[in-house]
Amino acid sequence: MSEALLSCRGVVYPWHCDHMGHMNVMWYTGRFDEATWALFAHLGLTPAALRDGGRGMVAADQHTQYSSELLAGDLLSVHTRVLAVGNKSIRLRHEMRREPEGSLAAVCTLVGVHIDTDLRQSLPLPKSVRKLAEPLLCGEEQ
């Protein structure tokens, strides 16, 4: 089993909740986005490095499965694993859990593509990204 990166921690505030009293889907998506950027930074794809190099990462595909509701006051964590590293893309899996018991709240799998921001074309990922991703690589969806 691969090592998972703790990529996000937080709390559900009342303003994150919808009229049914649980965290609205937009906030799950937001937390998964924060976790994605934390992973990218861990891999050396920081916002500054991407900007300075005229590079970017774009979401090509994203799927979320909801397992249990999060309510105001719940603590949460997101742990991330890399499922695959392609020539120009990376596929990853985020698991959001209610803390401290660790029960699964949601899972998000997504594909990010490395691009040239001027040409708006995909580019190969740097070799350094592959090396840093290896300890997080699990190669299978769980």
Image (tube, rainbow, N blue to C red):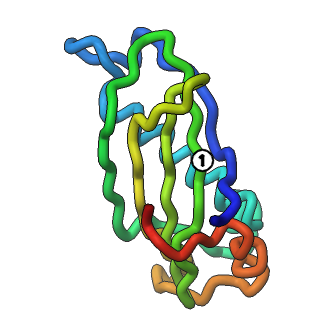
Q: Position of residue 105 (x, y in %)?
A: 40, 35
Give whichever of 114, 119 is nearer the camera.
114
Residue at left 43%, top 11%? 72
Give the quadrant of the N terminus: bottom right
Against 69, is 51 above or below?
below
Q: Which residue is at 71% across, 75% downward?
A: 134
On the image, the x and y values in percent for residue 66 come to 31, 40
Q: Does 16 appear above or below 141?
A: above
- In this rendering, the count of numbered labels is 1
Instruction: Please give left or right for residue 35 compared with residue 67 in the image.
Output: right
What is the quadrant of residue 124 in the picture? bottom right
Q: Amino acid at mark 1?
A: His
Residue at horizontal 77%, vertical 79%?
A: 131
Of residue 126 and residue 22, the one placed in the foreground of this image is 22
In the rendered structure, the answer to whether residue 28 lies left or right of residue 96 reads left
- Is residue 136 found left or right of 104 in the rendered image? right
Name which quarter of the figure residue 70 lies in.
Answer: top left
Looking at the picture, how far across and down is residue 20, in whole percent?
A: 21, 14
Give the image location of residue 117, x and y in percent. 55, 74
Crowding at mark 1 (Cα within 10 Å: few <14, some 14-19, many 20+): many
